[in-house]
Image (cartoon, grey):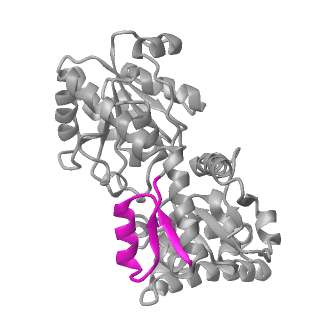
Amino acid sequence: MSKLVLVTPLPPAPTGIADYSALLLRELSARAPELAIETLSTREEAESFRPPSEPHVLMYQVGNSPHHDFLYPALFRHPGVLVLHDLVLHHARLFSHLESPEVRAYREDIGDSTKRESARVRLEEYRSEAREAYPAVGDDLAEIALRIGGGRLLYAYPLYEHLVRRSLLTIVHSGTAREEVLSSCPGADVKRVRMGVPLPTLVPREDARLRLGLPREELILASFGLVTPEKRISTAIRALARLEAAGVRATYLLVGGQVAHYDPLREARELGVAENVRLVGRVAEEEFRLYAFASDLCLNLRYPSAGETSATLLGLLACGRPVVVTDQIHVRDLPDTVVARSALEGDEDGLYCDLMDLIRVERRRRELGEAARRYAASEASPEVMAKDYLTAFEAVAGL
């Protein structure tokens, strides 16, 4: 192989996979300068692409987000290496078709037969994907999803299988994800590549709080990333109210962008802890890390999970923070010495008890943070990510 063609969103696209790909490009360029790299990051670039004549690998970075819509036509025309950042792609694929210009135009003028036909053709593309992924139930699945939007059904039918079967190689970021893909696609070539995140210089807790204007001594809990119900923010706010009732004063920071359909402050007001919850909003990477350094406990409680390996979670580990997670597929590979686990059973009661155990034992929090930092340095560094990718490329070149 003499050339890599990387099809992916790149900054300033507001998706973590864009930042991931930018980091990957830097690391590969530094460690394999002989490798020619071409990037396709827009619809126009992907549509005009023609495979080069020299030996090459085509690699698609795919996630459950509309920011990846542009790469699907190229992926279908020119299969290559599939990097699955999420094990559920169905939300994005359904949204891509339901909110396509053709379908929107028809919704606005349902009497127009030309627009109806254009919408029908676009929705038939979605049905075709569903049939290819699930030959036995694809038609029924597509009909249900188009009528009611899918809901939890989309987690049961994640809509990645047809992509795996088309691809020369599928890359995932955890051993558990690899097992999941192989259970759905027996015989597929699936390899694990470790995800890398930069290891930042440590900032003392007191210094971070001073720079952010946060209370010096108060207990601070924090969740990071887009503020959605799937992050179990509601459960955390109810547990926060339990802590307050038990005489434990804490501030809960939500560091990430908001969505229109969820208002955590309304819940906090109803529980009488509105003053304890602070919406920080989306912040730059350096400020993100400062909030991590300032926190006593970080909460990464996503449920349900799309099976992704969370760059946000790895970033918190790299900051040496004690992190509480739920036992989902994206964290099963992490040792119990590196993260604290909170069971889904028991809702806020269980989380409250788990938080109290950690709050009472400062030594346990310190040991978790130190182990997290060591794990990130050895198993989630940019260096090991680049090394794993180059090994995977060698395997593809030998096919």
* Picture residue at 42% right of the left edge, 16% below the top: 204
Residue 247 as seen in the image, left or right of residue 93: left
Image spot of residue 131 (x, y percent): 51, 86
Q: Residue furthest bottom?
A: 136
The total of numbered circles placed on residues is: 0
Note whether residue 91 is visible: yes
Image spot of residue 157 (x, y percent): 42, 73
Considering depth in this image, is 325 or 170 the residue closer to the camera? Answer: 170
Q: Is residue 385 positioned above or below 153 on the image? A: above
* Picture residue at 36% right of the left edge, 69% below the top: 180
Q: Write down the region rendered in magenta.
A: 167-194
Which image quadrant for residue 305? bottom left
Residue 198 as seen in the image, left or right of residue 31: left
Image spot of residue 283 (x, y percent): 58, 30
Which image quadrant for residue 267? top left
Q: Quadrant of the C terminus?
A: bottom right
* Picture residue at 50% right of the left edge, 11% below the top: 213
Note whether residue 99 is visible: no
Q: Is residue 36 positioned above or below 196 on the image? A: below
Magenta stretch encompasses residue 174: yes
Q: Quadrant of the N terminus?
A: bottom right
Image spot of residue 372 (x, y percent): 34, 36
Magenta stretch encompasses residue 59: no
Residue 78 as seen in the image, left or right of residue 253: right
Q: Is residue 394 positioned above or below 142 on the image? A: above
